[in-house]
Amino acid sequence: MNSITLAQPMENYSVVIFMLIVMIGLSAVADKIKLPYPVLLIMGGIGVGFIPSMPKIELNPEIIFLIFLPPLLYDAAFNISFKTFKTNISTIGTLAVTLVFLTATGIAVFARYVIPGMTWPLAFVLGAILSATDAVAAMSITKGLGLSHNTNTILEGESLVNDASALVAYRLAVAAVTGTAFVLWKATLQFAILMAGGMLVGFVMGKILSWIIARIHQNSMGTISFMLLMPFVTYLLAEDLHVSGVIAVVILGLSIARFSQNIFPEDLKKQSKSIWDIIIFMLNGLIFILIGLQFPFVLKHIQSNLIWPYIGYAFGITVIALLLRMARVFLQKFNLQQAFNKGRHKVTQEALLDFKNSLIIGWSGMRGIVSLAIAIGLPVTLADGSPFPQRNAIIFISVVVVLFTLIGQGLSLPWLVKKLKQD
């Protein structure tokens, strides 16, 4: 079978053009039939993947993190309201850190006792892969639903930060599988260094970009070009320094958003937004097509008698992740109300959650490209050369969970929002 790897120059450009045509066409159809376009693109990707002559599209996780994540995270952080983000920092932090580790543990317990052959380290690998919601999925599916500003900010803020938590959990779990001893205080210190280091890199790069833009903002092409380039530079620098590139790009976007309000001319804002909208549309579309494309290919690595049991395990994991998220969101709602009633100044009226918004936030926990990338990025072999145990099973279950959340919650979320608005 022919193979196309996204880490190498494309030899068959017709396949790339075909994917782009499918993506644009399905996006237009989704708009006409009022269906969330990520759902239709995923279904289209699955269908394209089953075409017999279709070359295998191999995803390189490093390329996914470098090419897709920086501009998408930067754009989301740039457009988020810093004031609302700060107001809801308690809820965002709870979902982006506490819930990630809680979900990883819940999925691990289920996997260890239900899925045959799953040891504790392997179960935690699967839990870490599926522990975080996806920024691209959350923003793409909730866009246009008329959610409150607070709810949108919480969902976007959570998805921007939780990737770092999930990646730390994943690295620790993989290290346990490969025989590296787990030490709690070392893991905690590593997480703190990754987060603090990423914040520092993002802050410094934001200052540098601000200094440059302040001197060239009259040159619109130069300004936009620097803004396009800086997320990639920031992500690479942070990763080279062994801190969180995800957090660095988010802090960069937040800092430039505050700076741009004071210095950007109106025509530059419009020009910049037009360029970014096209880039984000293309990247988003390709991501969902690629997610769908992976299903037919991972399916081929699973024995036919195990396919339905694995799909059942994936459904169980999806339900567990949803229940844990619902429980944590409503517990946060209760805690905020209690703190507000006791007169704690850090909790304002604007930070409180009502029932409807809590339900929407709880139902919006879609998984996406980050889960897919780190699953496919599992090591093929251990240090001694033996195969990584249960690798195909973990990848397949992860892909199916991603599809369940994106298609199931993606299709039901618009209905839920409309229903809550009518009540």
Image (tube, rainbow, N blue to C red):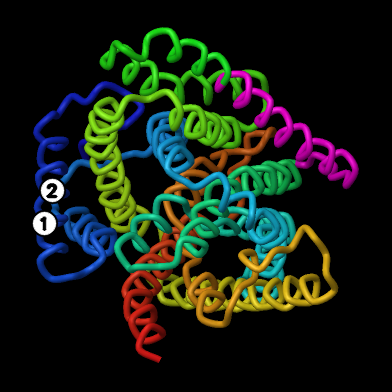
Magenta stretch containing residue 183, yes or no?
Answer: yes
Task: Give me the C-alpha separation between circle 1 and circle 2.
Answer: 6 Å
In the picture provided, is 266 more to the left or to the right than 148?
Answer: left
Observer-nearest of 291 and 86: 86
- Residue drawn at x 60%, y 78% as measured from the top left: 323
The rendered magenta stretch, by its main secondary structure, is classed as helix
* Tag 1: amino acid: Ala
* Tag 2: amino acid: Ile
Could you classify mark 2 by the number of other residues whose Cα lies within 10 Å: few (under 14), some (14-19), or many (20 or more)?
Answer: some
- Residue 166 location (% of width, % of height): 63, 49
Farthest-out residue, bottom: 423
Could you classify mark 1 by the number of other residues whose Cα lies within 10 Å: few (under 14), some (14-19), or many (20 or more)?
Answer: few
For disc 1, the marked residue is 28
For disc 2, the marked residue is 24
Q: Secondary structure at mark 1?
A: helix
Observer-nearest of 203 and 373: 203
Magenta stretch containing residue 52, yes or no?
Answer: no
Residue 279 in the image: above or below residue 398: above
- Residue 327 location (% of width, % of height): 66, 78
In the picture provided, is 58 more to the left or to the right than 182?
Answer: left
The quadrant where residue 342 appears: bottom right
In the picture provided, is 65 more to the left or to the right than 329?
Answer: left
The quadrant where residue 296 appears: bottom left
Q: Secondary structure at mark 2?
A: helix
- Residue drawn at x 76%, y 40% as measured from the top left: 191
- Residue 280 location (% of width, % of height): 30, 40
Residues rendered magenta in the picture:
179-206
